[in-house]
């Protein structure tokens, strides 16, 4: 891969800002919409830029091919469940907590990779990073000012949502030979198909008069934080590789915490800051071990 230039670092920061901005926008969306509706609108609007790109680049969408069951399963686990759990959980907890809890994805993927892949085994550096990172999360749950008996389950559901991303990523290895745009477009289609009847039966959002800020946020979540963010991720991966793109993991919880304070004036306690630092250090050591292995291979 080529040596990253200034524009590459700017795009990486921009991607981190887009993904980090999703959390406070989810919070705003919950003011008017239910969790299923938010999840549906995210995948519906998110599919638009991805499918338009596939059409422009003449990439075949295989959502209903012989591998449809893989696309449906990944769409359910990687999009439907986490999008619902995060939206449901953010109704009761601050969005900055969601940003930190979701940042455990690289740590969880390392644990899962050890057991379900051949080339992702633990070593000392990875183990140290995992222990530091998850210690930060455990410490965050001790912050009774922000997580208490009223929203403890909601925080756990967000953490479960991050795990679903990891499981979905492992399942994606089954169809790893297919183009990223095709896989993303196909799973977005299936997530839309799955969520639509659930939304109609359980929430009936047409009966609600939504606030303007909630409407803007949910459209933003779909078009920008889901659709455009995935396309930008593809661009960075193609031009700069996985090692460079993985650095976005450090920035998301930091930006998410800052943005939630700027836009929602959410409380940032000492325990939140300590947890954020611990998770960032944990991710750093896990990524360092992965990067070293990639460079040596």
Image (cartoon, helix red, strand yellow):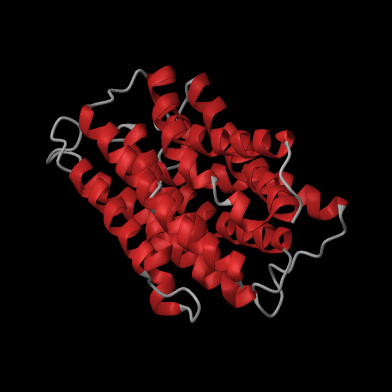
Res. 130 image quadrant? bottom left
Q: Nearer the viewer, residue 116 or 198?
A: 116
Q: Is residue 248 left or right of residue 134?
A: right
Is residue 95 placed above or below 60 in the rendered structure? Answer: above
Q: Nearer the viewer, residue 91 or 143?
A: 143
Residue found 43% across the figure and 78% down from its top: 116
Task: Let me know if residue 201 appears in the view.
Answer: no
Q: Is residue 235 left or right of residue 190?
A: right
Task: Let me know if residue 105 appears in the view.
Answer: yes
Res. 268 image quadrant? top left
Name the spot of residue 39 as percent of width and height, x first. 49, 46
Position of the N terminus by quadrant: bottom right
Is residue 180 placed above or below 147 in the rendered structure? Answer: below
Position of the C terminus by quadrant: bottom right
Name the spot of residue 35 as percent of width and height, x first. 40, 43
Name the spot of residue 87 as percent of width and height, x first. 40, 42
Q: Is residue 244 left or right of residue 201?
A: right
């Amino acid at each position: 891969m080529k040596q990253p230039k200034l524009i590459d670092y700017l795009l990486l920061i921009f991607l981190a800002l887009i993904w980090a901005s999703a959390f406070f926008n989810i919070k705003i969306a919950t003011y008017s919409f239910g969790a299923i509706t938010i999840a549906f609108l995210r995948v519906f609007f998110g599919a638009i830029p991805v499918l338009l790109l596939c059409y422009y680049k003449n990439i075949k969408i295989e959502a209903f091919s012989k591998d449809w069951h893989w696309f449906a399963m990944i769409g359910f686990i990687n999009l439907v469940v986490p999008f619902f759990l995060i939206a449901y959980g953010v109704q009761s907890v601050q969005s900055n907590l969601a940003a930190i809890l979701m940042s455990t994805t690289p740590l969880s993927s390392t644990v899962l990779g050890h057991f379900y892949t051949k080339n992702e085994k633990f070593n000392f550096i990875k183990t140290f990073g995992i222990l530091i990172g998850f210690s930060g999360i455990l410490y965050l749950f001790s912050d009774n000012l922000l997580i208490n008996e009223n929203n403890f389950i909601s925080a756990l559901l967000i953490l479960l949502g991050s795990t679903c991303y990891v499981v979905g990523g492992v399942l994606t290895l089954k169809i790893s030979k297919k183009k990223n745009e095709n896989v993303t477009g196909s799973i977005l289609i299936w997530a839309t198909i799955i969520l639509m009847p659930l939304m109609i039966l359980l929430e009936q959002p047409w009966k609600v008069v939504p606030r303007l800020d909630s409407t803007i946020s949910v459209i933003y979540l779909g078009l920008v934080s889901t659709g455009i963010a995935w396309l930008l991720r593809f661009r960075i991966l193609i031009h700069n590789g996985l090692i460079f793109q993985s650095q976005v993991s450090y920035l998301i919880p930091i930006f998410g915490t800052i943005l939630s304070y700027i836009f929602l004036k959410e409380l940032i306690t000492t325990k939140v800051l300590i947890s954020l630092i611990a998770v960032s250090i944990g991710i750093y050591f896990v990524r360092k071990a992965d990067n070293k292995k990639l460079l040596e291979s």
